[in-house]
Image (spheres, rainbow, N blue to C red):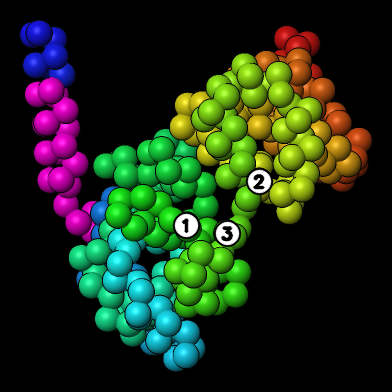
Amino acid sequence: MKKAVLCAIGSFFSLLLIQAQPLNREAAHGENNPYLIGKINREGLSNAGYAQWFLGNKRDYVPKPEVLKVVKEQLNDYTITLFMGTWCGDSKREVPRFYKILESVQFPLERLTAVAVGREANNYKQSPGGEQEGLNVHRVPTFIFYRNGKEINRIVERPIHTLEEDISDILKGEYRPNYQAVASIHTALEEMGLKKFQKKSKQLLARTKALVDSPYELSSYSYLLFTQGKKEEALAVAELNVQLYPEDARVYHSLGNRLLALERNTEALVQFKSALLLDPGNEKAKKAIRALETKEVQ
């Protein structure tokens, strides 16, 4: 009983801490490159340091009036959570446009939660309040649309057509977002667990081939998993990516990096050599090989 009470008290204070976090907090990247982190709002994006791209891109965007009319009729039934990076080029382009659309259809901004995520290895695409947890935010910006508390759909990184047309398609139930391969792999890991995921790799390979568009998709997702401490899951995704793109040097290099970070140096060396075989001019692979071979000699 005492333990349960202590857990409840801990959860209560954790919730208070999250709620008490200041809006528009800045973090530093080097000496002269601050970025917003945690919950933010339109005013924070309009302040010095962000205003040039935010206000400029919002002003210059002209959404299609006929599509806005459709959006305006239904969007107020939704709440939206936006994840972005003020350091991210895609976010700088799409987020001001998104705000322009919301303002044009008079969407109440209290129904929008905007979260800025980090860019460092220890907070990569994460917020201090943990708002991204369990949501598979692997690309920014990500716009998640909810109705009655349930996720209906999302726009990931960039629209398929235009933002307002994509929103309209979501409202009509006719939308298929980018990065379906990552969504599928994420769901498989969540539902199967790592061991079953590894056992089912052949079935997953066939399914993922039909969804994946480039080797960058799973390489990026693997790195994100690694920064979140899910190192074996990151490795499993990197290994699957090699099977998907066996002729691409970059996937071997990415797998080599994951193995190297786990201090599995012999296996990492094999992957870097595979990358160099496919891309003889790969200087990064050459450097990694020299470093590992020197370490072995010592």
Q: Earlier in the sequence, mark 2 or mark 1?
A: 1
**Element at label 3:** loop
**Mark toward the viewer: 2 or 1:** 1
Instruction: Say whether marks 2 and 3 touch (CB < 8 Å).
Output: no
**Marked residue nearer the N-terminal end (3 or 1):** 1
To which residue does mark 3 refer?
A: 177
Coordinates of residue 192 in the picture (x, y in percent): 57, 24
The residue lying at 52 percent from left, 58 percent from top is 156
Work out which quarter of the rendered image holds the N terminus and state it: top left
| Magenta stretch contains residue 19 | yes
Alpha carbons under labels 2 and 1: distance apart = 15 Å
Residue wearing tag 1: 153
Q: CA distance from mark 2 to mark 3?
A: 11 Å
Q: Is 100 located above or below residue 77 in the figure?
A: below
Badge 2 is on which residue? Answer: 181
Q: Which of the two residues, 4 or 249, is positioned nearer the viewer here?
A: 4
Q: Nearer the viewer, residue 223 or 147?
A: 147
Please tell me how many numbered marks the rendered image carries: 3
Relative to 202, is 47 on the left or the right?
left
- Residue depicted at x 59% and y 32%: 188
Q: Quadrant of residue 238?
A: top right
Does 160 lie within the magenta span? no
Q: At label 3, which amino acid type do we have?
A: Pro
- The structure residue drawn at horizontal position 57% and vertical position 29%, both measured from the top left corner, is 189
Position of 241 relative to 166 (above/below):
above
Find residue 254 and report its image quarter: top right
**Is disc 2 surrounded by few (<14), some (14 to 19) or many (20+) residues within 10 Å?**
some
At label 1, which amino acid type do we have?
A: Asn
Name the residue rendered at 29%, 71% in the picture: 76
Relative to residue 270, is residue 32 drawn left or right? left
What span is in magenta?
Answer: 8-29
Q: Are marks 3 and 1 in contact (CB under 8 Å)?
A: yes
